[in-house]
Amino acid sequence: MQESEALLISQGHYEELSFLSQKYKIRLEKLVEAILEDFLEDQVAMNRIFAELKTKSKLPADIQAWLWHYNNEFRIKLESDIAKFENLTAELLQNRYREHPRSNFHEQGLKDLEDKRVGMLGQTAFLSILNELRIPHNYDVPVFFWRQHRLPADFIIPNFGSVEIKTVKKNDRYLVVKRELWEKQMRTNHVPDYVVVLQCCDDDFLICGWLHGKEIGELPHNPVICPYAPCYCTELSKLRPFNELYAKLKKLSSDLGC
């Protein structure tokens, strides 16, 4: 092959390669445009979800999250059938208390039973946070009856302290703690380090905030909210924000290999 012929062939390949390069460049640009469009659509969708999260008391159906955090608001979503389990547990406790009467249970009967059911759901919700964040802990299982099987608080977390969970109902605006029961905890030196308050909503839990255990005994009595017995009481809006406690909890997260 003569040198002039080889040059023509190489020029032809170069032109062909240039054409292919331009062709794939156009395809790449179109692909990038499509990706950007999808991203913008996703961004719009996320903004819509965040707006719903701020205005509704429950998570949007298209969010599959257990612990959802937005704008310093923490919500917990549990498996839908856990409530059935807690109903059975509450019935078990009711039957047990009939056999072993406790004054703080029998005074109001079914109302206390419903409070107990909601309280156990709140404890399970907080337990899910510790499990999700892989935080080692001891949990005071409510169905244990013998004293040697119980703990002085709902949760004991190494290098953190003891935690008691208080759960209020959907439309409640106040945290109410019976003074008689709390003073008993004070006398036995069983006041927890932290009290975390959850609110049971339609299909999730809102973490309203927290207080130091010692602060409960400093709360005022509100005879309008607690007309039947002395209590410690405060508005949910006056609790400490949970993001302060959440930051401390996250530092305890461990890699448990799962």
Image (cartoon, rainbow, N blue to C red):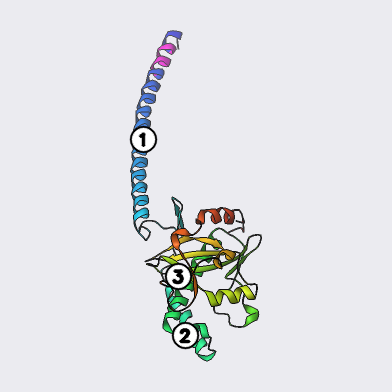
Q: Is residue 112 magenta?
A: no
Which region of the structure is painted magenta? Answer: 6-12
Q: Which residue is mark 2?
A: 107
Separation (CA) of disc 3 from disc 2? 20 Å
Which callout, 3 or 1, points at the residue further toward the start of the chain?
1
Q: Is residue 76 in view? A: no
In the image, taking residue 193 as reference, residue 177 lies left or right, namely: left
Quadrant of the rendered structure where residue 246 is? bottom right
In the image, taking residue 182 as reference, residue 122 lies left or right, namely: left
In the image, taking residue 77 as reference, residue 210 lies left or right, namely: right
Q: Main secondary structure of the magenta part?
A: helix
- Residue displayed at 58% across by 75% down: 183
Which amino acid, by three-letter code, is at mark 1?
Leu
- Residue displayed at 60% across by 74% down: 185
Which amino acid, by three-letter code, is at mark 2?
Glu
Considering the numbered disc 1 on the image, is that residue within a helix, a strand or a loop? helix
Q: Which residue is mark 1?
A: 31
Q: Is residue 32 in view? A: yes
Q: Which residue is mark 3?
A: 222
